[in-house]
Image (cartoon, helix red, strand yellow):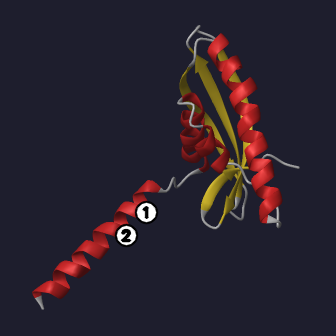
């Protein structure tokens, strides 16, 4: 009986840990992806992009191409501005069905400049992803 209670308790802790690690809002998810970009974790950043390609080989090619492009061009742009210091979520506009949103955010750079932009986010299998279009 005691072993079953301990096992149940451990399972509950594991489930709660998994749930707490999943960003629950589109703004939080976007902020996590932008932090990955700032940390030069390009794979994590691209994992946050919705690549809806049915062919897994084609999706892999697209993913690898995006990673290479971001490494080459995106990192240089960020470095020129003194690095990305902070991402501030300004607003989140959710659709009625709750499966997509427009997130307005500000990027604060090391050189003191600030850029405001928007990003469409969509929920895929319960996870918020950046909608990069086709």
Q: Is residue 43 left or right of residue 8?
A: right
- Please state the total of marks drawn on the protein image: 2
Counting from the top left corner in percent of width and height, residue 52 is at 79, 60
Give the residue furthest to the left. 2
The answer to whether residue 51 shows anywhere in this view is: no
Where is mark 1, residue-wise? 19
Q: Are marks 1 and 2 in contact (CB under 8 Å)?
A: yes
Give the residue furthest to the bottom. 1
Residue shown at the point (75%, 55%) measured from the top left: 60
Using the image, tell me which numbered label, if any, was put on residue 105: none
Q: Quadrant of residue 57?
A: bottom right
Q: Quadrant of residue 19?
A: bottom left
Where 103 falls versus 47 (above or below)?
above
In this orientation, which residue lies closer to the viewer: 58 or 101? 58
Using the image, tell me which numbered label, if any, was put on residue 15: 2
Q: Is residue 2 left or right of residue 133?
A: left
Give the residue furthest to the top. 111
Residue shown at the point (55%, 12%) measured from the top left: 110
The answer to whether residue 57 shows anywhere in this view is: yes
Residue shown at the point (53%, 30%) measured from the top left: 39
Counting from the top left corner in percent of width and height, residue 81 is at 64, 12
Counting from the top left corner in percent of width and height, residue 124 is at 68, 63
Q: Residues within 10 Å of mark 1 (few under 14, many from 20)?
A: few
Counting from the top left corner in percent of width and height, residue 16 is at 35, 65
Where 77 falls versus 41 (above or below)?
above
């Amino acid at each position: 009986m005691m072993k079953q209670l301990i096992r149940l308790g451990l399972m509950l802790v594991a489930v709660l840990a998994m749930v707490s690690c999943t960003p629950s809002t589109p703004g939080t998810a976007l902020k996590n992806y932008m932090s990955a970009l700032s940390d030069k974790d390009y794979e994590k950043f691209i994992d946050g992009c919705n690549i809806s390609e049915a062919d897994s080989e084609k999706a892999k090619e697209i993913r690898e191409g995006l990673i290479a492009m971001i490494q080459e061009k995106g990192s240089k742009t960020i470095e020129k501005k003194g690095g990305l210091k902070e991402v501030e979520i300004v607003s989140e506009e959710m659709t009625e069905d709750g499966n997509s949103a427009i997130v307005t955010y500000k990027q604060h750079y090391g050189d003191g400049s600030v850029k405001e932009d928007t990003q469409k986010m969509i929920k895929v299998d319960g996870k918020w992803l950046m909608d990069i279009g086709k």
